[in-house]
Amino acid sequence: MPPMLKFELLKREGAARRGRLTLNHGVVETPVFMPVGTYGTVKGVMPQSLLDVGAQIILGNTFHLWLRPGLEVLRRFGGLHRFEGWPRPLLTDSGGFQVWSLGEMRKISEEGVRFASPVNGDKLFLTPEVSMQIQHVLNSDIVMQFDECTPYRSGERLTTEAEARRSMELSLRWARRSRAEFERLANPNALFGIVQGGMYEALREESAASLAQMDLPGYAIGGVSVGEPKEEMLRIMAHTPHRLPEHKPRYLMGVGTPEDLVAGVAQGIDMFDCVMPTRNARNGHLFTRFGDLRIRNARHKDDERPIDETCQCPACRGFSRAYLHHLDRCGEMLGPMLASLHNLHYYLNLMREVREALDAGGFEVFAARFRQERSSGIG
Amino acid sequence: MPPMLKFELLKREGAARRGRLTLNHGVVETPVFMPVGTYGTVKGVMPQSLLDVGAQIILGNTFHLWLRPGLEVLRRFGGLHRFEGWPRPLLTDSGGFQVWSLGEMRKISEEGVRFASPVNGDKLFLTPEVSMQIQHVLNSDIVMQFDECTPYRSGERLTTEAEARRSMELSLRWARRSRAEFERLANPNALFGIVQGGMYEALREESAASLAQMDLPGYAIGGVSVGEPKEEMLRIMAHTPHRLPEHKPRYLMGVGTPEDLVAGVAQGIDMFDCVMPTRNARNGHLFTRFGDLRIRNARHKDDERPIDETCQCPACRGFSRAYLHHLDRCGEMLGPMLASLHNLHYYLNLMREVREALDAGGFEVFAARFRQERSSGIG
């Protein structure tokens, strides 16, 4: 498989890695957090503002973009970059997680997943081949294999090892079909494989080893953030990265809190994505280096201070907690706009600090101070 | 009454006027359009973006800000400017229009208007004195007198001349009480009177003459945009400005379409405000120099062109009609954000062109071309 991306490991500290990804639309310094732009927009944030707060690469959701605006429109624009006005690298998921989220509305077979469009009821059939075809039209810099996201539980019952094995093996077969179609399409971007195996370390190990044999340009850890207890996620995060090829980027999908990110870096993760900074912003949940702040709380009603006096984001440089509280209370759009900018700035700035600490060989010290500050509480 | 504002007439063409208002927070070139920021935010637009698209002065609504965040918070911030992060001039209405809009929920007497707060049901009493006290706390550069907005109709029945007279005379008495309280408070800003009289020209004339005797620093024409047919509004707009003192700024409240603005300038109006650019934007109604465009229309689905190829706004410089159509269809916040920026840019740029035409003595030619282009239709 030709090198459609370059990944350099610049520095290490313990298991933590400082790296540099070169993709078709630019360079990404790792460890990196990737904001999520499901429908071709990071909710409430202009592309220019994303650049201003330091975003290097953002996500798009294959499933959503397939339904709206659809491939005809995206093809006309030569892909997602021009359509959404984002000049830098893009990663798209495979649609697997979204069809999984449809629950009872979908039917999974060896061939793929049948479901009815939640937009207009159309009968749709998503397969590894179709996922590759959509992502080829999107022209994303990083393409994710089509996988089955193994659930943590079905109703009250936890997923058994036998079920997790069947699911993991299906994802492996789909990885091979994904690669075959990706190559048939002569997609010039990079295809990542996804490790599955549920909460079973032996299965994770088997999945990682089989994917490693495929020599893909990067690997993701999927099937976390699917409703499992936090300790279960942390257990997988402490296990699986160390079973992945050393010189390939490692992406932990859908994770997480600031603490999760720093802990993930310590375990050798290079890439993260999560809706948390933007979704929580819309609910008035703000992240700061001194802990989280709920702007809806009445104690902020007349507080003249910014969210965080040490923060350089556009919300903290111009507006008070009292004003943000007021905007939230009145349901004004500017509230989520400013909160999203603040939270994204916080996440992206945190990862910049992580990279600087790694560059300087001081990640462990940084991580200790980070945990201490985060738990100190914001006044 | 001391000069708390300076108004210079720089140029005239027919009845149209090119002027310059000097207020406590800066200079306003007229004719001017003032974006509306009801709750201390122009919906969906950052203050910096307002400056970028050329806003010189924005509105706040006394009634809304009194209810939320309330005077205690606003007093702590020394007024609305610092609270909302807007460094330039502000105008606040008196609350009269909003209590009028409450319909059956309010009771008007000589003393003022009793009503229940639509936010929490509190019994409130808004009087000329209270309105002046609130606007003093807001520290708006232009304070509007408390008035009764004469309705165009009550149910099926048009307002009679006798009713309009009673209402107009009440507003005149409230103008005197507003001025007395404004002076008692030693408000350093500018108080504007409001001409009422319904659709009766004789009453309008009487109202204008009585207010002129008060020698206020500026005058507004109220009681239009209250549900009357367009021709009625245009008739009042062609009548009343000419009865107002020549060397005072003239403000037509709540008007209107781009055509209304250019027609208003031709009748000697200096100031306009309207929710139309922002409210219509949120409904996918976009203004352009070649006519209006409904972005929800399916014909925009795959259109790669910007809203208007000749427009320099942030929406037109970065995004296609297809993308804006997609954002609207998906209910994405970025849709109204970009549409609001576009419409405000259109309105503010139109007024800049009007001022340049007046400066060059070419307003009549400009207005003819404007009408011709606007009716040509956008492709």
Image: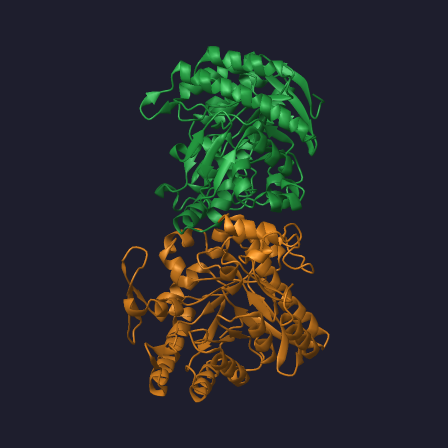
Chain colours: A orange, B green
Q: How many marks?
A: 0
Q: Who's the residue at 44% across and 56% down the image?
A: A39
Q: Who's the residue at 39% across and 53% down the image?
A: A69
Q: Quadrant of the C terminus of chain B?
A: top left
Q: Give the answer, above or below, for where A86 lies relative to A102.
A: above
Q: Give the answer, above or below, for where A216 lies relative to B126.
A: below
Can see residue A123? yes
Percent x, y for residue B153?
37, 23
On screen, residue A26 versus residue A163, left or right, reads right
Q: Who's the residue at 61% across and 30% down the image?
A: B143
Where is residue A62, by image quadrant?
Answer: bottom left
Percent x, y for residue A143?
46, 67
Q: Quadrant of the N terminus of chain B?
A: top right
Percent x, y for residue A129?
36, 69
Q: Nearer the viewer, residue A314 or B1?
A: B1
Looking at the image, the residue that sits furthest to the top is B202
Can see residue B309? no
Q: Nearer the viewer, residue B113 or A93?
A: B113
On screen, residue A200 versus residue B244, left or right, reads left
Where is residue A366, by image quadrant?
Answer: bottom right
Percent x, y for residue B14?
58, 12
